[in-house]
Image (tube, coloured by chain):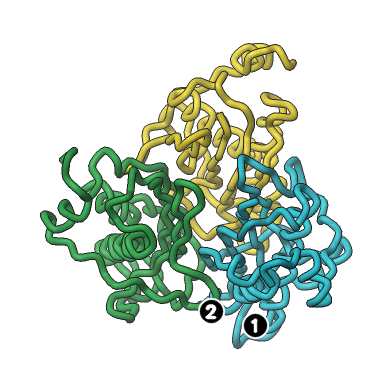
Chain colours: A cyan, B yellow, C green
Amino acid sequence: MTTQTWSARLSELGITLPQVVPPLAAYVPATRCGDLVYTSGQLPIVDGELRTRGKVSESAEGVVHLEAAVAAARQCALNALAAVHALVGIDTVVRVVKVTGFVASAPGFSNQAAVLNGASLLLGEVFGDAGRHVRSAVGVAELPLGAPVEVELVVQV
Amino acid sequence: MTTQTWSARLSELGITLPQVVPPLAAYVPATRCGDLVYTSGQLPIVDGELRTRGKVSESAEGVVHLEAAVAAARQCALNALAAVHALVGIDTVVRVVKVTGFVASAPGFSNQAAVLNGASLLLGEVFGDAGRHVRSAVGVAELPLGAPVEVELVVQV
Amino acid sequence: MTTQTWSARLSELGITLPQVVPPLAAYVPATRCGDLVYTSGQLPIVDGELRTRGKVSESAEGVVHLEAAVAAARQCALNALAAVHALVGIDTVVRVVKVTGFVASAPGFSNQAAVLNGASLLLGEVFGDAGRHVRSAVGVAELPLGAPVEVELVVQV
């Protein structure tokens, strides 16, 4: 894997990076400062649409269940990689530095770590050892558009 | 605008940076590390006083309405710029890198993006293209002193 | 204090850094990027066990009271320093740059600043002026494992 490009690795995994999700408001999807690229907080939007809404719970009815939340976190990470790719090209990534994840949490839900693994494991699949990152995962009251999860990345290029 | 200083631009806009809000506790308003300046999370304090308190909602009574929250986010950004100015001088700013915003959200309020635009649009007015930043906006349960919004900045100098 | 190492200072204070808390999931405790070390969000785990659980309040029954939350924030900071120490050695620290703290907050609790002082004051005791940092403190709905507080650090080495 060491001589491979990340774009080749993505192909090998059958992953096509999505289109960049346009910012909801007056900001940009990613920005570079020296050798760091920061992304905006990414929601699990697919083809312009937020398909999963609500608070994450392991038990309650009418909310987002854990498996759906894990998949949503993975989508957030894909959207973040798309933002990085559009700015600097995915093959310039040296490593993933940091993941910050916010999970809209139903009362009593404390498995934010499992949700964010949807993002972390994707980064591991794609980047291997270069995908090892620090992470903070917290459970918040509400996220933009009613999203269940929001993920931001810092990567080194 | 390219040959203008930021302090001249602020004057042109009729904006006077406020006094730095003293930290609530054992930390400092801003710190520099290489070419990055980080600010502490700023509350919408004006003249030493938090004039807006409560959770943001678009519908409920007895809470902070959207327009007031937008204005509060703008004040947070001004306070953050004041912290930057006191540390390194506003005219040393090369660009704004990142805005992180926390909105104390009443149940069901998911328009954190609109609230944070109060901060983002101010940065755009002052810095133009150099004000384009990444942003994460989340809705949280409670903020210090009962503030409706808290904003931190990373800027490049 | 200027000619002293941080490890000597810790000894003088009677503080032994704990073992690094193993990540809950697919991430690492700390990572270095240039002269910055970022830690993962740290919970107040002691000897592999989260001894304090619940939401912080100044008044309610059945929750974590302020003093316990302050002690928990201090433990989070110790765990973060342990993560830094394991990666680069505590004596390479030049300064603390940033503390981000999340407090699981009972409704109406707005003294997140006092809770996070448990972390900030520890950093001041150990590092003196080099421990002066920016800080954001927010009150969130839920934290991993039901923890009352989570703290992440950025330090310069």
Residue B11 vertical placement versus A77 (above, below)? above
User: In the rendered image, is residue C57 in sight?
Assistant: no
Badge 1 amino acid:
Leu
Q: Residue at x 50, y 62 (%)?
A: C140
Q: Dot 1: few (<14), some (14–19), or many (≥20) neighbours within 10 Å?
A: some
Residue B111 vertical position relative to residue A146 in the rendered view, above or below: above
For the residues labelled 1 and 2, the Cα–Cα distance comes to 9 Å
What residue is drawn where x is 43% and y is 27%? B20
Which residue does the numbered mark 2 point to in the structure image?
Answer: A111
Q: Are marks 1 and 2 in contact (CB under 8 Å)?
A: yes
Question: Which residue occupies the foreground of this view, C73 or C7?
Answer: C7
Question: Judging from the image, what secondary structure is the residue with disc 1 in?
Answer: helix
* Subunit ID for the residue under disc 1: A
Q: Residue reaching furthest right?
A: A47
> Along the line of sight, which residue is nearer the eye, C29 or B148?
C29
Percent position of residue A35, x then y: 61, 45
Q: How many marks?
A: 2
Tell me whether marks 1 and 2 sit on the same chain. Answer: yes
* Residue B116 on image: x %, y %: 66, 44
Chain on which label 2 sits: A
Q: Determine which residue is flagged by label 1.
A: A66
